[in-house]
Amino acid sequence: MGNKDFDLDDAYGLKTPEELLRYYRTLAPSYDADFAAAMDFRVPQLIAEAYAAEAIGPVLDVGAGTGLLAAELHKRGVTPVDGVDISPEMIAVARGKGVYRDLHLGDVTTRMDFPDSSYLGCVSSGTFTFGHAGPEAIEEMLRVTESGGLFALSVHSGVYAAAGFAARFSALEEEGSIMCFRAADIAFYGPRATGPHAGDHGFLVTFRKV
Ligand SMILES: C[S@@+](CC[C@H](N)C(=O)[O-])C[C@H]1O[C@@H](n2cnc3c(N)ncnc32)[C@H](O)[C@@H]1O
């Protein structure tokens, strides 16, 4: 990677919300250039493609970061996009891009400041990974999404089973809360990526709220 501040081992080793906030406070201004561009980060584009193929806005972008996913949704005609992120500095960068209708500071693993069934769908890119948000977020995302709404999320392969995402999706499917579940294995980074994480992959998970 182009900048040593973006050592992914630091991101994956985050242990507490305080560490996560400190990490993104420092990195927000250079995230797009030194992480996303340098690592040829493909996930926002892949999530936007999957979502835009089957659904429309309003859609909530969870862990919106600097707004890369919303920009990809806009390119595909999906609007309006609202975003939520735990980091004020990441939100500030996203706000500057003008691709969100609303941006909210919030933690997706707790109750968010949105009424039930506010959105026709919910998307997330890069937020379900080591040291970030866990599967407890999924119920809250379901709460704010309308019945029939589409979900398109990335989950890093290293946490998919280990942090309980696979079990949570199975349980939600079995209890009849979600339907049309699919998990496609995707490469997170393109051919320009370098370093020990260049080959990282995960799942592009799609489903609908029953
Ligand atoms: C790797 S960045 C991804 C940003 C953007 N979605 C992208 O694809 O470039 C992960 C983002 O998730 C946010 N995040 C981590 N845990 C969160 C939580 N519990 N609730 C909301 N946002 C969270 C971080 O602040 C960070 O902006």
Image: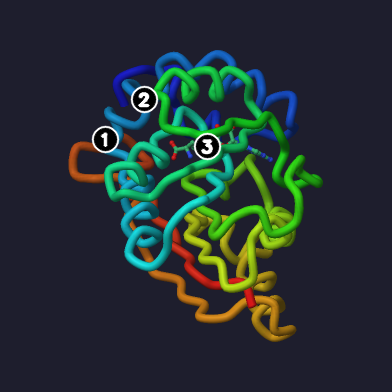
Residue 205 in the image, given as x and y percentages of width and height: 48, 65
Q: Is the C terminus in the top left, top right, bottom left or bottom right quadrant? A: bottom right
Task: Tell me which image quadrant ligand 1 sits in.
Answer: top right
* Label 3 residue SS: loop
Residue carrying label 2: 32
Cβ atoms at labels 1 and 3 below 8 Å apart: no
Q: Quadrant of the N terminus?
A: top left
Is mark 1 in CB contact (under 8 Å) with mark 2?
no
- Secondary-structure class at tag 2: helix
Quarter of the rendering containing residue 22: top right
For the residues carrying marks 1 and 2, which lies nearer the camera in this image? Answer: 2
The amino acid type of the residue labelled 3 equals: Ala
Mark 2 nearby-residue class (10 Å; few <14, some 14–19, many ≥20): some
- Labels 1 and 2: the sequence-earlier one: 2
In the picture, measured across the screen, residue 172 lies left or right of residue 205, that is right
146 lies left or right of 1: right
Q: Is mark 2 within 8 Å of ligand 1?
A: no
The residue that disc 1 covers is 194
Tell me if the residue at label 3 has its CB under 8 Å from ligand 1.
yes
Residue located beneath label 3 in the image: 64
